[in-house]
Amino acid sequence: MTATALPVASGQGQWALGERAPLNHNEQFKQDDGPLEVRKRIEQTYSRLGFASITSDDLRGRFRWFGLYTQRRPGIDGGRTAVLEPHELEDEHFMLRIRIDGGRLDADQLRAIAEVSTQYARDTADLTDRQNVQLHWVHIEDVPAIWRTLEAVGLSTTEACGDCPRVVVGSPVAGISPDELVDPSPAIDEITRRFVGDPDLANLPRKWKTSISWLPDVPYLTNDIAMIGAVHPEHGPGFDLWVGGGLSTNPMLARRLGVWVPLADVPDVWLAVTRLFRDYGYRRLRHRARLKFLLADWGVARFREVLETEYLGRRLVDGPAAQTAPRMIDHMGVHRQRDGRWYVGATPIAGRVSGTALAAVARLAQRHGSGRVRTTVDQKLLILDVEEADVAPLTAALAAIGLQVAPSTWRRDILACTGIEFCKLAIVETKARAAELVAELERHPSLAAAEISISLSGCPNACARTQVADIGLKGQLVRDASGALVEGFQIHLGGSAGLAAGATAGFGRKVRGLKVTAAELPAYVRRVAAAYLDQRHHDE
Ligand code: SF4
């Protein structure tokens, strides 16, 4: 029996089964007009006629393919998120996401982002946990000029959001780490050059998240497709292929396909998996349209069979046994490069920087390094190629703009999503709360030894990887002692993406009924840290 002859549930909107009729509004607008077509309308019509001229399907649908989301109207509390219509929740400004594949920037690119931020985005800038930079307060009238500024230095917002291949996450120390056997940057470059903006891949069932890294310094188990370094006993160094990871409201970790992919084949294998998803992915229900649901129904063996027979036309090499993941590295501090120079990792709090700060980083990267900068999946920045004598002055200069090279463990291990400040789906504040929490916890240095990671997400969508943090905080309204509904969090405890030393991959346990109000949060974290330090086993 061939793979395609196996029984499948029909009626899920799978193109490979001939189910082309759109089954929901998103599928309809994607089929009515290719999402990439909206760029012309932005340049020729919307930027000239203004916000009111934008059609609903472009505004809340196709704009995402160019990194544009409408921004939450200020002053709307989280209790009204679920009851207001989209047009009541948004104002006439946009969030703009700039994709930074592999987290790689040079000084000119960083300066261009800073210029856009200060000129068009009220000096806002957030480092996201997928190595992008996100700006706020953008007007539609300015978008063509913003694109010109970014594209002049090789940056893009194309497919930074939407149901398409989003930024390719990669190790921020690719090409410089002494521990790396293969630098996958050429494969990342080829994928972005060939396929980002390709209309053939611009209508996938849902977003498509990729990571490609030799080192396990990206959370690869939570991507739709991930390739991570592996040494084959006969063929040498290459990549282990994982598929079907994703968090959000129904989290699943990626599963290993059991194949080994040489560097030269990475783009074509990536393309084959992506096309499989495009054709077989479920399109009926948005919340079941990620690859993880197809993989859960098919299983790994069938997935591999279809991939090889229908999309690659050849067998893949069986991979070596899964290799134990060493400790997740966030690259903070000062580290030796393979060429003898140093890279310096520095962190703001939960990714919040500014255009002014990024311009300063560009200057510092040129003065003390080669100008190369990297963004990380932990909302941090690295400055590469620093001579030893430059490390101390660079470290001091970074501290002066709020980027700490030797942060407290709390500052180092906290992530926060956009939250209610700008996100239309949010229920609670996140970034400011993360800053308050860090400030409060840093007043208790004895607790820092707990090395607890904290993740704050403003709603159940878990954009800050709630389920794989030691303390995952999912924003919701909770009742305080007086019975009033206030901002608070559902607690998840003990999550791991399998990247901590000796850890097994797994999600934090949602502790039934365990919710805290935002006001109680610092005291709660202090209690968890104290109890952990008191009761942990000596090797934990
Ligand atoms: Fe917005 Fe929710 Fe994602 Fe936070 S987790 S960025 S609030 S959708």
Image (cartoon, grey):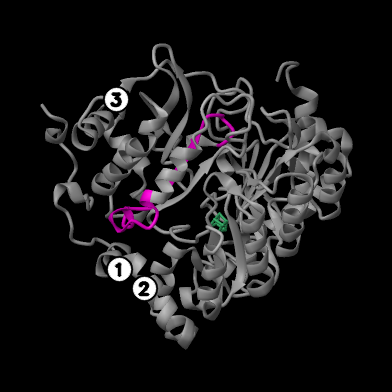
Q: CA distance from mark 1 to mark 3?
A: 37 Å
Crowding at label 1, few (<14), some or many (≥20) Cα neighbours within 10 Å?
A: some
Spot occupied by residue 162 in the image (x, y as percentages of width and height)? 41, 59
Q: Secondary structure at mark 1?
A: helix
Crowding at label 3, few (<14), some or many (≥20) Cα neighbours within 10 Å?
A: some
Residue positioned 27% across, 42% down in the render: 276
- Ligand 1 near label 1 (Cβ, under 8 Å)? no
Number of numbered discs present? 3
Q: Which mark is residue 316?
A: 3
Relative vertical location of residue 476 with respect to residue 413 in this rendering, above or below: below
The question of residue 145 being in magenta is answered with: no
Q: Secondary structure at mark 2?
A: helix
Spot occupied by residue 89 in the image (x, y as percentages of width and height)? 53, 74
Task: Using the image as rendered, state which of residue 84 and residue 394 is in the foreground.
Answer: 394
Query: Does the residue at mark 2 contact the one at mark 1 (Cβ under 8 Å)?
Result: yes
- Quadrant containing ligand 1 reads bottom right
In the visual, does 258 lie left or right of 514?
left
Which amino acid is tagged 1?
Phe
Q: CA distance from mark 3 to mark 2?
A: 41 Å
Identify the mark nearer the N-term, 2 or 1.
Answer: 1
Q: Which mark is residue 76?
A: none
Which amino acid is tagged 3?
Leu
Spot occupied by residue 355 in the image (x, y as percentages of width and height)? 70, 63
The image quadrant that residue 198 belongs to is bottom left
Is any atom of residue 481 visible in this view?
A: no
Which amino acid is tagged 2?
Asp
Residue highlighted by disc 2: 57
In the image, the segment drawn in magenta is 194-218
In the visual, does 148 lie left or right of 115?
left
Task: Using the image as rendered, state which of residue 490 and residue 471 is in the foreground.
Answer: 471
Q: Which mark is residue 29?
A: 1
Residue positioned 39% across, 26% down in the render: 262
